[in-house]
Amino acid sequence: MSAYDKVLAARSTKKPTSMDYIHNLFGDTFIELHGDRNFADDKAMVGGVGMLNDIPVTVIGLEKGRNTFERMERNFGAAHPEGYRKALRLMKQAEKFHRPVLCFVDTSGAFCGIGAEERGQGHAIATNLMEMMALKTPVLSIFIGEGGSGGAIALAVADEVWMMENAVYSVISPEGCASILWKDSSKAAEAAECLKMTAKDLFELGVIERILREPEAGNQKMFESLKLLICRTFEKNLSIPGDELAQMRYKRFRKIGAQE
């Protein structure tokens, strides 16, 4: 598959969404929590608490929806500032009770409407980056579809970042990049190759730690394997003191892009 084929696969409406992952990994133990305690409850950002085997976990996901009605209700996974503030509220709650945080990322980017800008979209994302870097509890982020710009990285300042084999992660969409560089969005496929946005590219660059096989909706065996992998990672990181964990996370990001 070409890089642009991966982009199209990441955008497919047939892919499991964040809610599918939550349902298959946490089942009936998941309790959704709402609101940022400031403005509203953003339905593009799902968050709550659930049990992963014997481990209580705070889980947060950007949710696109499964059909046209759900996608409109979820704003196509494009979160408003209150969504990022809700996510941060749940992360700080997790830190208080020393619960690990699991994030699912699937968004073309944060919502860029006038209302979102008026309510401080950039500030909300920047605050998440700062606070997540110092969070004294384990954080794991998994890219399950699109990972677009600041809207994605606002949930990806983690101890480890994993990607599904058909997920992408980039500062801009290929169409947007082509429109800026060549004034021609039809060159999106060429832009996708240049952006190095596929899981394979990012693994080779040291931006992510693991590439995961793509589970199909309803394929419980794949979800059980993923569940076991997540549990082992959290068990390992829960044994590390909070201050040390935050320092390791800081060093992880400092070495990305460093020249030998």
Image: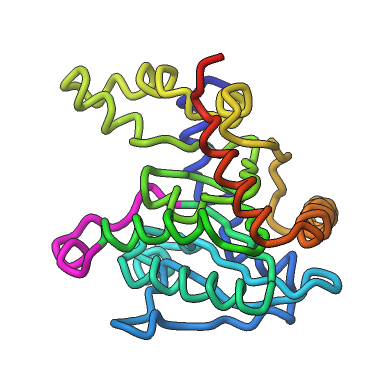
Q: Is residue 99 above or below residue 241?
A: below
53 magenta-colored: no
Residue 254: percent from the left, percent from the top? Answer: 51, 35
Figure quadrant of the C terminus: top right
- Count of picture labels: 0
Figure quadrant of the N terminus: top right
Residue 89: percent from the left, percent from the top? Answer: 47, 75
Is residue 139 in view from this perspective?
yes
Q: Quadrant of residue 161?
A: top right
- Which residue is depicted at the point 45% across and 26% down? 4
Is residue 220 in view from this perspective?
no
Q: Is residue 182 above or below residue 68?
A: above
Locate residue 259 relative to residue 188 in the image: left or right: right
* Magenta region, residue range: 107-120
110 magenta-colored: yes
Locate residue 141 relative to residue 99 in the image: left or right: left
Q: Is residue 159 above or below residue 231?
A: above
Q: Quadrant of residue 186?
A: top left
Residue 23: percent from the left, percent from the top? Answer: 68, 70
Q: Is residue 50 above or below residue 72?
A: below
